[in-house]
Amino acid sequence: MNHKGVAVVALLGTLGLPLYGQASDYAEISRQAEQQARWGSLSAAIAAYRQVLANPDLEASHNTARLRLARLYLDSFDYPAARSELAQLIATAPDSEEAKQARKLQRKAASKTKAHSYGGKVQFAFIHDTDTANASSGSPVSEPSFNDDEDDVDSDEDEDDAFDGDEDFADADFDDDLLEDVDLDEDDLEDEALEDDEDADTTAKPKRTVHDNRRQASAALRYSYGLNERGDRWNLAGNFSHARQDDQDTLNRETIALSTGPVFLVPDWRLKVNPSVTYLQLYKDHRYDVSSTIWSLGVSHKLNRVLELGVRYNYENRDLNSENSPDVEIDTLKFSVKFKPTSHDSFDLSFSPKVEDNDQRKKDKDQGGWKVAYARKLPWDSFAGIAYTRRHTDYGNDPKGKEEDEDKYALTLGHKLTKDLLVAVSYEHKEKDSNQVGKDKNNESTSLSLSYRF
């Protein structure tokens, strides 16, 4: 085996993959490195390309290897290293196709460390509920995110896909809904705020369901300040939501949430660390208002290009400002998995144990909930999504041994009218089963929404 062959075999060995005969060129190294980046480990792929660049026998492939290495550094949140490799590539071969692609990646890298970034979203929705008191309070549509086309940074294809968001917020650490993990549905708040009549008639019949229409307007604003060239940032976000019922005026509400906190990057471990604090105020047209302060600590780890793992802890102190209403402390731990095997498919899985301590001990709750969601990018700038959520609640100190199971099924179909304008229709079935007579609830929601990003 000649010197070049020995070097190539050694490089393939660093990837930890089996060899099937003697590899003889860069193409085999690159193929296996990209497989590692996609399904295995980003660090293994980085090591392989670095050794390619250190091997003079593979000099003809150095430009392509450097371009791929820069992309791997971007995937690993190591923005200074990515900028360095891209600058060297452009200086070495300024007129090459690789340099053209490098300039695109340079703009992406610059957006991650720019001093000031901002953006937002406005949404208007018309919603019909079959039982307004059991309806979900959040946004009817959560727009999915998809990976970029995975095959090549070398491709000549236009990267301005309608699903690509503002690069400033491509890795946003705030969701559009800051309160996704906060229980603000009407039936949850009623459970916390109202005194139970322990002598109530155990043969009570279920409450009459009321059909009603709801008009909901919401706005989300984001600002991000770059702390350094590494990509650490300080984020500030605000959400506002205004909902009005056609008939059930007592269910009208306004919600304001403000959140702030830093995002620290640890490129060696491909980690993002995001402590934050959120203040929430919910204004009701009847018995109570709600104010909450939520302290959070989130950590996410990008294992490879298609798999990201996350964990977040929330401590919420909730005050229900109505007569004889209790204060509530809520501890939530959320484990999440984001899996994007192709540029057209996105899976989300989460599990959220929660403990709620209420001033009225019989209302203490132990909850366990999980969610699975799948989204598919369709032709004509469209997408479809399906989600299932299940939550079990145990009122451990309730003298009646109260327990509840809640299931939600959701379907969404969306279409991009322009890159920033989305129209969507959605359907949700929500059902709550209680072991207490007359406490079962269910609701079916259908919605039409229009969203604009800026």
Image (cartoon, rainbow, N blue to C red):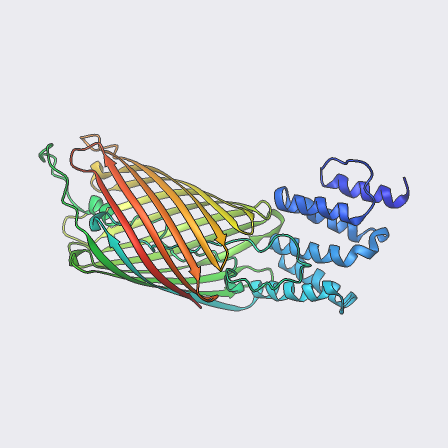
Whether 450 is drawn above or below 366: the answer is below
Image quadrant holding the C terminus, namely bottom left
Q: In this view, does 182 lie to the left or right of 33?
A: left
Count of marks, rendered view: 0
Q: Is residue 59 left or right of residue 301?
A: right
Image quadrant holding the N terminus, namely top right
- Figure quadrant of residue 362: top left
How far across and down, in percent of the image, does residue 243 sit?
A: 25, 60
How far across and down, in percent of the image, does residue 326 sit?
A: 20, 46
Which residue occupies the foreground of this view, 80 or 15?
A: 15
Q: In this view, does 101 lie to the left or right of 311?
A: right
How far across and down, in percent of the image, does residue 266 sit?
A: 58, 51
Which residue occupies the foreground of this view, 310 or 166?
A: 166
Residue that extends furthest to the front in the rendered view of this protein: 380
Q: Which residue is drawn at 38% across and 63% down?
A: 451
- Figure quadrant of residue 106: bottom right
Residue 193 visible in the shown view: yes
Whether 64 is drawn above or below 339: the answer is below
- Figure quadrant of residue 124: bottom left
Residue 137 visible in the shown view: no
Q: Residue at x 52, y 53 (%)?
A: 146
